[in-house]
Image: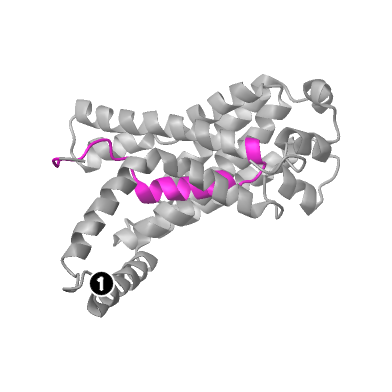
Protein backbone atom coordinates (compact mmCIF):
# COMPACT_ATOMS: atom_id res chain seq x y z
CA UNK A 1 0.00 0.00 0.00
CA UNK A 2 2.99 2.30 0.40
CA UNK A 3 6.12 2.70 -1.75
CA UNK A 4 8.64 -0.14 -1.76
CA UNK A 5 11.28 0.32 0.90
CA UNK A 6 8.92 2.27 3.16
CA UNK A 7 6.22 -0.37 3.38
CA UNK A 8 4.37 -0.45 6.68
CA UNK A 9 4.33 -3.96 8.11
CA UNK A 10 1.75 -3.75 10.88
CA UNK A 11 2.76 -7.07 12.42
CA UNK A 12 6.39 -5.93 12.59
CA UNK A 13 5.27 -2.64 14.14
CA UNK A 14 3.19 -4.52 16.71
CA UNK A 15 6.12 -6.79 17.58
CA UNK A 16 8.34 -3.74 18.07
CA UNK A 17 5.81 -2.10 20.38
CA UNK A 18 5.43 -5.26 22.47
CA UNK A 19 9.10 -6.17 22.48
CA UNK A 20 8.71 -9.85 21.49
CA UNK A 21 9.86 -11.91 18.54
CA UNK A 22 7.15 -12.87 16.07
CA UNK A 23 7.54 -16.63 16.42
CA UNK A 24 7.58 -16.42 20.23
CA UNK A 25 4.66 -14.04 20.42
CA UNK A 26 2.12 -16.36 22.01
CA UNK A 27 4.53 -18.04 24.45
CA UNK A 28 6.16 -14.84 25.73
CA UNK A 29 3.05 -12.67 25.89
CA UNK A 30 1.20 -15.24 27.96
CA UNK A 31 -1.95 -14.68 25.90
CA UNK A 32 -3.78 -17.84 24.89
CA UNK A 33 -6.27 -18.16 22.07
CA UNK A 34 -9.25 -18.90 24.39
CA UNK A 35 -8.42 -15.88 26.56
CA UNK A 36 -8.16 -13.62 23.53
CA UNK A 37 -11.44 -14.90 22.10
CA UNK A 38 -13.19 -14.30 25.42
CA UNK A 39 -11.85 -10.73 25.50
CA UNK A 40 -13.00 -10.08 21.91
CA UNK A 41 -16.42 -11.61 22.59
CA UNK A 42 -16.73 -9.44 25.71
CA UNK A 43 -15.96 -6.30 23.70
CA UNK A 44 -18.55 -7.32 21.10
CA UNK A 45 -21.18 -7.96 23.78
CA UNK A 46 -20.36 -4.68 25.51
CA UNK A 47 -20.66 -2.74 22.26
CA UNK A 48 -24.20 -4.04 21.72
CA UNK A 49 -25.47 -4.36 25.31
CA UNK A 50 -24.49 -0.84 26.35
CA UNK A 51 -26.84 0.59 23.70
CA UNK A 52 -29.76 -0.59 25.84
CA UNK A 53 -28.28 0.60 29.15
CA UNK A 54 -30.19 3.94 29.28
CA UNK A 55 -33.59 2.21 29.35
CA UNK A 56 -32.80 -1.15 31.00
CA UNK A 57 -30.20 -0.15 33.60
CA UNK A 58 -30.46 3.60 34.12
CA UNK A 59 -34.25 3.49 33.75
CA UNK A 60 -34.32 6.73 31.80
CA UNK A 61 -37.67 7.76 30.31
CA UNK A 62 -38.20 6.95 26.63
CA UNK A 63 -36.57 9.52 24.33
CA UNK A 64 -38.93 12.21 23.11
CA UNK A 65 -37.41 12.39 19.62
CA UNK A 66 -35.18 10.53 17.20
CA UNK A 67 -32.40 13.04 17.87
CA UNK A 68 -32.46 12.36 21.62
CA UNK A 69 -32.56 8.60 20.97
CA UNK A 70 -29.53 8.75 18.67
CA UNK A 71 -27.55 11.04 21.00
CA UNK A 72 -28.03 8.48 23.79
CA UNK A 73 -26.69 5.78 21.50
CA UNK A 74 -23.77 7.98 20.48
CA UNK A 75 -22.76 8.39 24.12
CA UNK A 76 -23.11 4.64 24.76
CA UNK A 77 -21.01 3.72 21.69
CA UNK A 78 -18.28 6.18 22.67
CA UNK A 79 -18.18 4.83 26.25
CA UNK A 80 -17.99 1.27 24.92
CA UNK A 81 -15.09 2.20 22.63
CA UNK A 82 -13.17 3.87 25.46
CA UNK A 83 -13.67 0.85 27.72
CA UNK A 84 -12.48 -1.49 24.94
CA UNK A 85 -9.39 0.63 24.32
CA UNK A 86 -8.52 0.60 28.04
CA UNK A 87 -9.19 -3.16 28.29
CA UNK A 88 -6.99 -3.85 25.29
CA UNK A 89 -4.19 -1.68 26.72
CA UNK A 90 -4.35 -3.58 30.02
CA UNK A 91 -4.34 -7.03 28.40
CA UNK A 92 -1.58 -6.45 25.87
CA UNK A 93 1.82 -7.01 27.53
CA UNK A 94 3.43 -3.88 26.17
CA UNK A 95 6.99 -3.06 27.13
CA UNK A 96 6.03 0.61 27.46
CA UNK A 97 2.71 2.35 28.10
CA UNK A 98 3.81 5.49 26.33
CA UNK A 99 1.29 7.17 24.06
CA UNK A 100 3.42 6.55 20.96
CA UNK A 101 3.39 2.78 21.54
CA UNK A 102 -0.34 2.70 22.28
CA UNK A 103 -1.13 4.75 19.20
CA UNK A 104 1.08 2.48 17.10
CA UNK A 105 -0.75 -0.65 18.30
CA UNK A 106 -4.12 0.94 17.55
CA UNK A 107 -3.01 2.04 14.08
CA UNK A 108 -3.17 5.74 14.89
CA UNK A 109 -0.20 7.05 12.93
CA UNK A 110 0.87 10.21 11.16
CA UNK A 111 3.20 8.79 8.52
CA UNK A 112 2.07 7.82 5.00
CA UNK A 113 -1.36 9.34 5.63
CA UNK A 114 -2.12 10.06 1.99
CA UNK A 115 -1.34 6.46 0.97
CA UNK A 116 -3.59 5.19 3.78
CA UNK A 117 -6.44 7.34 2.47
CA UNK A 118 -6.09 7.58 -1.32
CA UNK A 119 -5.12 3.98 -2.18
CA UNK A 120 -7.78 2.17 -0.04
CA UNK A 121 -10.38 4.71 -1.18
CA UNK A 122 -9.47 4.11 -4.83
CA UNK A 123 -9.60 0.35 -4.28
CA UNK A 124 -12.99 0.59 -2.56
CA UNK A 125 -14.41 2.77 -5.33
CA UNK A 126 -13.85 -0.05 -7.85
CA UNK A 127 -16.75 -1.88 -6.21
CA UNK A 128 -18.97 1.08 -7.05
CA UNK A 129 -18.04 1.37 -10.72
CA UNK A 130 -21.64 0.59 -11.70
CA UNK A 131 -22.99 3.17 -9.25
CA UNK A 132 -20.62 5.84 -10.58
CA UNK A 133 -21.57 5.02 -14.18
CA UNK A 134 -25.28 5.31 -13.41
CA UNK A 135 -24.87 8.56 -11.46
CA UNK A 136 -22.74 10.02 -14.27
CA UNK A 137 -25.37 9.20 -16.88
CA UNK A 138 -28.11 10.71 -14.75
CA UNK A 139 -25.99 13.82 -14.17
CA UNK A 140 -25.33 14.20 -17.89
CA UNK A 141 -29.05 13.94 -18.59
CA UNK A 142 -29.81 16.66 -16.04
CA UNK A 143 -27.10 18.89 -17.53
CA UNK A 144 -28.64 18.63 -21.00
CA UNK A 145 -31.69 20.43 -19.71
CA UNK A 146 -29.54 23.44 -18.70
CA UNK A 147 -27.32 23.70 -21.76
CA UNK A 148 -27.19 26.96 -23.71
CA UNK A 149 -27.99 27.06 -27.40
CA UNK A 150 -24.26 26.91 -28.15
CA UNK A 151 -23.98 23.71 -26.10
CA UNK A 152 -22.27 25.23 -23.03
CA UNK A 153 -23.42 25.21 -19.44
CA UNK A 154 -25.32 28.29 -18.36
CA UNK A 155 -24.36 30.37 -15.33
CA UNK A 156 -27.73 29.57 -13.76
CA UNK A 157 -27.02 25.84 -14.08
CA UNK A 158 -23.65 26.13 -12.31
CA UNK A 159 -25.20 28.33 -9.64
CA UNK A 160 -28.02 25.82 -9.18
CA UNK A 161 -25.60 22.91 -8.79
CA UNK A 162 -23.48 24.79 -6.25
CA UNK A 163 -26.57 25.78 -4.26
CA UNK A 164 -27.79 22.19 -4.22
CA UNK A 165 -24.40 21.02 -2.95
CA UNK A 166 -24.34 23.66 -0.20
CA UNK A 167 -27.89 22.77 0.83
CA UNK A 168 -26.98 19.08 0.95
CA UNK A 169 -23.90 19.75 3.12
CA UNK A 170 -25.94 21.92 5.47
CA UNK A 171 -28.68 19.30 5.73
CA UNK A 172 -26.16 16.51 6.39
CA UNK A 173 -24.40 18.52 9.12
CA UNK A 174 -27.67 18.93 11.02
CA UNK A 175 -28.93 15.38 10.37
CA UNK A 176 -28.41 13.06 13.33
CA UNK A 177 -28.55 10.00 11.06
CA UNK A 178 -25.72 11.43 8.95
CA UNK A 179 -23.62 11.80 12.10
CA UNK A 180 -24.37 8.16 12.92
CA UNK A 181 -23.54 6.83 9.45
CA UNK A 182 -20.48 8.95 8.67
CA UNK A 183 -18.90 9.75 12.04
CA UNK A 184 -19.93 7.87 15.20
CA UNK A 185 -20.63 4.37 13.84
CA UNK A 186 -17.53 4.11 11.59
CA UNK A 187 -15.19 5.57 14.21
CA UNK A 188 -16.39 3.48 17.17
CA UNK A 189 -16.73 0.26 15.18
CA UNK A 190 -13.27 0.55 13.64
CA UNK A 191 -11.75 1.33 17.04
CA UNK A 192 -13.34 -1.72 18.66
CA UNK A 193 -13.38 -4.31 15.88
CA UNK A 194 -10.12 -3.40 14.17
CA UNK A 195 -7.84 -1.32 16.42
CA UNK A 196 -8.56 -3.31 19.60
CA UNK A 197 -9.34 -6.83 18.40
CA UNK A 198 -6.70 -7.33 15.71
CA UNK A 199 -3.69 -6.73 18.02
CA UNK A 200 -5.20 -9.08 20.61
CA UNK A 201 -5.83 -11.83 18.06
CA UNK A 202 -2.34 -11.51 16.57
CA UNK A 203 -0.73 -11.61 20.01
CA UNK A 204 -2.83 -14.63 20.89
CA UNK A 205 -1.14 -16.61 18.14
CA UNK A 206 -3.81 -16.41 15.42
CA UNK A 207 -2.58 -16.34 11.85
CA UNK A 208 -3.26 -13.26 9.75
CA UNK A 209 -5.79 -15.09 7.56
CA UNK A 210 -7.61 -16.33 10.67
CA UNK A 211 -7.74 -12.78 12.02
CA UNK A 212 -9.19 -11.49 8.75
CA UNK A 213 -11.93 -14.13 9.13
CA UNK A 214 -12.61 -13.85 12.88
CA UNK A 215 -12.91 -10.07 13.16
CA UNK A 216 -15.72 -9.74 10.61
CA UNK A 217 -17.63 -12.61 12.24
CA UNK A 218 -17.61 -10.73 15.55
CA UNK A 219 -18.34 -7.52 13.63
CA UNK A 220 -21.42 -9.06 12.03
CA UNK A 221 -22.65 -10.55 15.32
CA UNK A 222 -22.70 -7.02 16.73
CA UNK A 223 -25.47 -6.28 14.21
CA UNK A 224 -27.77 -9.09 15.39
CA UNK A 225 -29.67 -6.62 17.57
CA UNK A 226 -31.05 -5.15 14.34
CA UNK A 227 -33.17 -8.30 13.94
CA UNK A 228 -35.10 -7.53 17.11
CA UNK A 229 -35.51 -3.88 16.14
CA UNK A 230 -36.65 -4.81 12.63
CA UNK A 231 -39.02 -7.50 13.87
CA UNK A 232 -40.63 -5.47 16.68
CA UNK A 233 -40.45 -1.82 15.69
CA UNK A 234 -41.14 -2.17 11.97
CA UNK A 235 -43.68 -4.95 12.48
CA UNK A 236 -41.98 -7.24 9.97
CA UNK A 237 -42.74 -10.93 9.83
CA UNK A 238 -40.09 -13.22 11.28
CA UNK A 239 -39.11 -14.44 7.81
CA UNK A 240 -38.87 -10.94 6.34
CA UNK A 241 -36.88 -9.64 9.33
CA UNK A 242 -34.53 -12.63 9.12
CA UNK A 243 -33.96 -12.10 5.39
CA UNK A 244 -33.29 -8.37 5.83
CA UNK A 245 -30.88 -8.85 8.74
CA UNK A 246 -29.31 -11.90 7.07
CA UNK A 247 -28.45 -9.77 4.03
CA UNK A 248 -26.94 -7.15 6.33
CA UNK A 249 -24.90 -9.76 8.21
CA UNK A 250 -23.64 -11.10 4.90
CA UNK A 251 -22.23 -7.84 3.64
CA UNK A 252 -20.91 -6.86 7.07
CA UNK A 253 -18.84 -10.07 7.03
CA UNK A 254 -17.52 -9.20 3.57
CA UNK A 255 -16.77 -5.61 4.49
CA UNK A 256 -15.30 -6.65 7.85
CA UNK A 257 -12.83 -8.95 6.08
CA UNK A 258 -11.88 -6.16 3.72
CA UNK A 259 -11.49 -3.61 6.54
CA UNK A 260 -9.34 -6.04 8.55
CA UNK A 261 -7.15 -6.60 5.49
CA UNK A 262 -6.75 -2.83 5.04
CA UNK A 263 -5.79 -2.38 8.69
CA UNK A 264 -3.18 -5.14 8.69
CA UNK A 265 -1.84 -4.24 5.23
CA UNK A 266 -1.39 -0.52 5.91
CA UNK A 267 -0.99 -0.37 9.69
CA UNK A 268 -3.31 2.65 9.63
CA UNK A 269 -6.69 2.87 11.33
CA UNK A 270 -7.45 5.60 8.83
CA UNK A 271 -7.52 3.10 5.93
CA UNK A 272 -10.54 1.02 7.08
CA UNK A 273 -12.14 4.16 8.53
CA UNK A 274 -12.31 6.04 5.22
CA UNK A 275 -13.47 2.87 3.45
CA UNK A 276 -16.20 2.44 6.07
CA UNK A 277 -17.42 6.03 5.70
CA UNK A 278 -17.32 5.75 1.90
CA UNK A 279 -19.36 2.51 1.89
CA UNK A 280 -21.92 3.99 4.28
CA UNK A 281 -22.23 7.00 1.99
CA UNK A 282 -22.60 4.95 -1.20
CA UNK A 283 -24.82 2.18 0.21
CA UNK A 284 -25.11 -1.11 -1.63
CA UNK A 285 -23.50 -1.11 -5.08
CA UNK A 286 -25.82 -0.74 -8.08
CA UNK A 287 -25.96 -4.10 -9.85
CA UNK A 288 -28.41 -3.19 -12.62
CA UNK A 289 -30.28 -0.17 -14.01
CA UNK A 290 -33.89 -0.18 -15.21
CA UNK A 291 -33.20 1.60 -18.48
CA UNK A 292 -32.43 0.75 -22.09
CA UNK A 293 -29.02 0.85 -23.68
CA UNK A 294 -26.06 1.27 -21.37
Would you say 151 lies left or right of 91 here? left
Residue at (19, 62) in percent of width and height = 142
Q: In the rendered image of this protein, does residue 29 appear above or below residue 62? A: above
Q: Is residue 44 visible?
A: yes
Q: Quadrant of residue 230?
A: top left
In the rendered image, residue 267 lying in the magenta stretch gets the answer yes
Would you say 131 lies left or right of 265 here? left
Residue range in magenta is 265-292
Residue at (85, 45) in percent of width and height = 96
In the rendered image, residue 91 lying in the magenta stretch gets the answer no
Rendered-image quadrant of the C terminus: top left
Residue at (32, 30) in percent of width and height = 247
Rendered-image quadrant of the N terminus: top right
Q: Is residue 49 visible?
A: no
Give whichever of 192, 46 is nearer the camera. Answer: 192
Q: Residues within 10 Å of mark 1 (few under 14, many from 20)?
A: some
Give whichever of 158, 121 is nearer the camera. Answer: 158
Residue at (34, 62) in percent of width and height = 67
Residue 79: give x, y in percent of width and height. Answer: 55, 51
Residue 219: give x, y in percent of width and height. Answer: 49, 34
Would you say 31 lies left or right of 249 here? right
SS at badge 1: loop
Residue 66: give x, y in percent of width and height. Answer: 30, 59
Give whichever of 253, 160 is nearer the camera. Answer: 160
Q: Where does label 1 land, which residue? A: 153
Residue 65: give x, y in percent of width and height. Answer: 29, 61
Amino acid sequence: MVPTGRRCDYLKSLVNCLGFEKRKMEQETGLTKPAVMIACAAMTLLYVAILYAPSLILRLPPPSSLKEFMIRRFVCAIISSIVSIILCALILPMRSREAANLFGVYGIRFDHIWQAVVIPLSLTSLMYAGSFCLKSLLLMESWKEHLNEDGGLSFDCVKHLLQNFIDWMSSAASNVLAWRNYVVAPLTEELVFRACMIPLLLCGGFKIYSVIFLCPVLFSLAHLNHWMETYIRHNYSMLKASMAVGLQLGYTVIFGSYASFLFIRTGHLLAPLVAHVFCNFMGLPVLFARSKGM
